[in-house]
Image (tube, grey):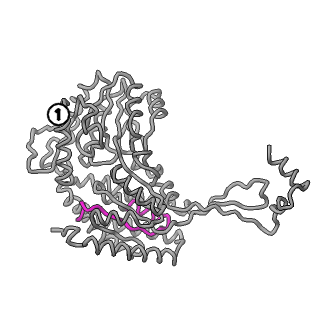
Amino acid sequence: MVATVTDLHTPDREIERLRTLFIQQKQAFRSHPMPSPEERVEQLRRLKQGLIDNQDKLISAVNQDFSCRSKDETLVAEIMITVESINYMINNVRKWMRPSRRHVSMLFAPSYNQVVYQPLGVVGVMVPWNYPIQLALVPLATNLAAGNRTMIKMSEFTPATNKALKLLLDEIFDESHAAIIEGEVDVSTAFSEKSWDHLIFTGSTAVGKHVMAAAAKNLVPVTLELGGKSPAIVAPNTNLQHAVDRICFGKSLNAGQTCIAPDYVLIPEDQEEAFVKAYQTSFAKMYPKVRNNNDYTAIINDRQHQRLQAWVKDAEEKGARITVVNPAKEDFSGTRKMPLHLVQGATDDMTVLQDEIFGPILPLIPYKTLEDAIDYVNDRDRPLALYLFSYDKEHEHRVLNRTHAGGVSVNDTLMHIAQDDMPFGGIGPSGMGHYHGKEGFVALSKAKPVHRKGRFNSGKFIYPPYGTAIQKLIYKIFIR
C-alpha cells in the first residue's frame, strides 16, 4: 500500500521544502543561465529513456490511483504522446535556439537586429489528476528545451503516480534542476504564490482564476489550460456513423475525464434518435462489458463519482431523458465504474449544461439549422476544443470562421492535442497562452531583442541642437 501524501509530507514541511528548493533552483540557474544545445538535447534524451524504462511502473501507479485505468489509454494518451513530444523537441531545439535576424530600417543603418531566445529561469508547473504523467512531463520537457529549471506540483489525488514520477526524476536530475512537490490545498496555494519566472497551470476554470490572481501579486506570467464545455457539432448531411464512432472514442477515453473531451453534441433535430441508437452500437463494440473491463477507466475517486451521479439525478429530476449505455446490463454498485449517460431534453437550468462535465455524461442538443448550432456555441464561453463533423467544405468554412476555440479537430476528436508541430492552448475562460511544439519553446523563453551598432553612429544626425538642414531632410524622407 502506498502511503498518502499527508503521511509522507506534512503541509508545513512541504511548504518549507518548496521554499528551499525554489532558492536552490534560482541560484543554480544564475550560475548556469544559458545551457548549450548539446546539454538540452542530452537532458531530453535522459528524460525520454527514463520514461521508457519506467513505463510499466508508471502505468501500474496510475492504475492504482484510479482503481482501474486502462493500460492502453495510459500508453497512448500519456507515455506515447510524451515520448513523441520529446522526440520532436530533440530534433528541433537547436533550430529554435538560433537567434532570429530581423529587419533594420534605413533610418538606423548601419546596424544589426536580432532576437535571442533566452531561458526564463525557474518555472512552476501545476498538474491535475486526470493525465498526471503527460501533464507533468511535457511541460518539463519544454522547459528543458528552453533551458529552464522546473518545479512540479502534483495533484494530491494521484499519490502512487507522484511517488513513481519522483523516483524517476530523482534518477535523472538533481532537484536543483527538476523537482516534484506534493501536498493539498495549503501547498498548492503556497506554490501559486511564488515569484516564478513563469507558471503553467492545468485544471478547472474556477481554480485557474485563483491561480492567476495569486500569480498577479508577483506579476508572474501564466499559461492556463482550463477546459470548459467543448462542443461537437454534427453538421447536416454528414456521415452519422463516422461522427458517432469518433465522438464515442473521444468521450470514452479516460471515462470522459479529459479537458478536451466532447462535452455536448449539437445534432440536427431529425437525427437525434438515430444518434442515440448509433452511439449504443458503437459503445457496445468498444466496450461489450464495463464493470470488469480493464479497457474502461474508472472515475478517479468517490468525490468525483458522487458529483457525476448527482448531476445525472439533477437532469433527470428536471425532466431530461437519460439513456444509460450499458450493453451487458451490469450493476455498478460498489465500484467507481460509470458507463456513458446520454442526456436528451437538457435545459439551461441543469448542471450538465452549466459546468464542464469531466466524466461519462453527454448531453444532446438538437438544432434546426447550422446557423442555430453556431449561435449556440457563440452564446457561451469560448471552449478549449471544438469538434466539427462534416465533409462539406462550405460547412467547415462557416464553422471555423464564425466560432472561437482553443483548438479544433475536423472529423475527429482529441487528436489535435497530439500534433507535435501545433500549439495547444485555450482562449478566454478556457485558458490563455500556448505550449507544445515551437510555441511552447517560445512561451518559456524570453525573446530578447538585440540592436547592435558599430563605430559609425548615424544617430548623431538627430542629436540636438534641432532644426538643422540634415534633420529636416530626414523628416521629409521618413515622415511620409
Is 101 or 365 nearer to us in this picture? 365
The answer to whether residue 323 is visible is: yes
Q: Would you name the residue on which mark 1 appears?
A: 316
Assign the C terminus to one quadrant of the image: top right
Is 109 placed left or right of 28 in the picture? right
User: Where residue 201 sits in the image (x, y, percent)?
Assistant: 38, 57
Question: In the picture, residue 161 is in which quadrant?
Answer: bottom left
Is 287 placed left or right of 98 in the picture? left
Assign the N terminus to one quadrant of the image: bottom left
Is 188 placed left or right of 22 in the picture? left
User: Where residue 175 sits in the image (x, y, percent)?
Assistant: 38, 75
Query: Which residue is at a point 20% across and 44% down the rendered structure image?
Result: 308
Query: Which residue is at a point 52% across and 66% down the rendered structure image?
Result: 119
The answer to whether residue 90 is visible is: no
User: Where residue 123 sits in the image (x, y, percent)?
Assistant: 44, 65
* Residue 93 colored in magenta in the image: no
Tag count: 1
The span picked out in magenta is: 137-159
Query: Which residue is at a point 32% across and 52% down the rendered structure image?
Result: 77
Is 82 or 15 nearer to us in this picture? 15
